[in-house]
Amino acid sequence: MTGRKLIAGNWKMNGSLNANLALLKGIQSGLQAPACDVAVCVPASYLAQCQALLASSPIELGAQDVSQHEAGAYTGEISAVMLKDFGVRYVIVGHSERRQYHAESDNQVAAKAQRALANGITPIVCVGESLSERESGLTEEVVKRQLAAVIHLNGHCISEIVVAYEPVWAIGTGKTASPEMAQQVHAVLRAQLKAATPHSDRVRILYGGSMNAGNAAELLAQQDIDGGLIGGASLKPQDFLTIIAAAH
Ligand code: PEP
């Protein structure tokens, strides 16, 4: 990959007005000219608060999901245009928790990525195998199928997306893929991107799944690991700062 790594926090359904203030203050007070790009993907209800808190900060604002539809009768959904109103730069699509609990299909994830791109928001497209898929030797097949769905987005180049490899069995479990295991899958994804675009070097492939202050440096040193998508550790300022410092 050419360019800067990206460290993105995924707060999931955590936070409050007070907790967000303390967390962002803690991160910002320890952040001096980071050598990587940094983002926090916050709950939609706190976008306005976080936009204001990050106004003169190098930390960019992200969201955790977006509707595949443009506007209209979709109760409870949030459109890309609405996210744009709050200065959202990144949006996670296809997180395994959405695929699992909301039955999101590969095609829906692709439609969401497309909608984000059409509105100038970079989708962070998550792919990853479950434990039973890994144990059945299906890891490559699963992640390639998930990435293939977004590879030919109408009118947009695949090089505009960010990919996040998140083995489902490693998310929130404390089990991390070893750096070698992660690199192996990242290399597969890189090869797939290479076959799709001459600009594959521009696509950042993040690793996510129990990345923390202790294991980040080793993971981020792998050739095709271009950053991290961080859940639990992004809620602890010092841990998040340590991960950011490891990404150069
Ligand atoms: C995630 O939810 O994207 C994630 C990687 O979570 P955790 O870091 O807590 O495993």
Image (spheres, rainbow, N blue to C red):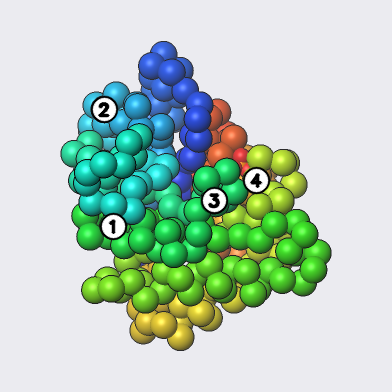
Image height check: is 28 above or below 121? above
Q: Say if disc 1 is inside 8 Å of ligand 1.
A: no
Residue type indicated by callout 3: Ala
Give the side of residue 118 with respect to residue 230, left or right: left
Q: Residue at x 29, y 52 (%)?
A: 69
Q: Nearer the viewer, residue 13 or 51?
A: 13
- Residue occupied by mark 4: 171
- Using the numbered discs, state the Cα–Cα distance from disc 4 to disc 1 in whole angstroms: 26 Å
Give the side of residue 110 with respect to residue 86, left or right: right
Q: Say if disc 2 is inside 8 Å of ligand 1.
A: no
Q: Of circles 1 and 2, which is in front?
A: 1
Mark toward the start of the polypeptide (4 vs 1): 1
Residue 34 x, y percent position in the rendering: 39, 45
- Confirm or deny contact between disc 2 and disc 4 (CB under 8 A): no
Residue 105 x, y percent position in the rendering: 50, 59
Residue type indicated by callout 1: Arg
Mark toward the start of the polypeptide (1 vs 2): 2
- Residue occupied by mark 2: 48
Where residue 183 sits, quadrant-wise, is: bottom right
- Quadrant of the image containing the N terminus: bottom left
Q: Say if disc 4 is inside 8 Å of ligand 1.
A: yes
- Using the numbered discs, state the Cα–Cα distance from disc 2 to disc 4 in whole angstroms: 28 Å
Residue 181 x, y percent position in the rendering: 71, 65
User: How crowded is the residue under tag 2: few (<14 C-alpha within 10 Å), some, or many (20+)?
Assistant: few
Mark toward the start of the polypeptide (2 vs 4): 2
Q: Say if disc 3 is inside 8 Å of ligand 1.
A: no
Q: Of circles 4 and 1, which is in front?
A: 1
Q: Residue at x 73, y 64 (%)?
A: 133
Q: Residue at x 40, y 45 (%)?
A: 65
Residue type indicated by callout 4: Ile
